[in-house]
Amino acid sequence: MIFLVALAAGLSHGLQGGAADYFRNAYLYFVSQRSRGDFDSSAALRSDYEALTWLENPWPKFLLASYLSFTRQQEMISLPLKRFRENVDRIFHDQIPEWLAAQYRNAARPAFKFWSVLMTNSRMLLLFAALVVDRISWFFWIEITVFNLLLVYLLFREERMCRSLLQNVRQSRQSQLA
């Protein structure tokens, strides 16, 4: 039984960590005017992957295949953020306007304290505490329940944020065309 609980906790941890990394990179991309390399899309990675051959570049192609798979998983976790990014890139051509960067910063920053709970430091503290009290199974159960509930909350919050910001982007685009 503990093996199944540990497996579920490990899978949960992977989803939670991937989502936290994805939203951290999105924040840097939209707020800090970073390049595509800091917030890759699976579509761009796919073209890089197809440009490599197994015969000439087996190791880089393998690594890129792994990263492409990881990026696809991150995008599937948050389709609204993926769509938001695609729309922004299509409309603004990788140059995020300052007004949008400010709106994204103001909308996303309050959630960072919650996203940070899904990062490594808080997990290590929790694992340490579980080891000290000799209740490692508590760590697994908290990973499966509390952290997954937090992830679901954050995903719903991010979906609302992306929807609202996308509406602002579309309104701005319409006013520019008028």
Image (cartoon, grey):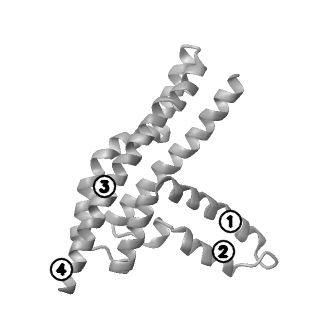
Find disc 2 in the rendering and name its residue: 49
Q: Which residue is mark 4?
A: 175
Which residue reaches farthest top? 133
Proximity of marks 1 and 2: CB atoms separated by less than 8 Å? yes
From this viewpoint, which residue is outermost toward the right?
55
- Per the image, the residue denoted by label 1 is 65
- The amino acid type of the residue labelled 4 equals Ser
The three-letter amino acid code for the residue at tag 3 is Met
The amino acid beneath tag 1 is Ala
Number of the label disc, if any, that sits on residue 161: 3
* Secondary structure type for disc 2: helix
- N-term-proximal mark, 1 vs 2: 2
SS for tag 1? helix
Vertical placement of residue 58 versus 144, above or below: below
| Numbered disc in front, either 2 or 3 | 3
Does residue 141 appear to the left or right of 28 in the view shown?
A: right
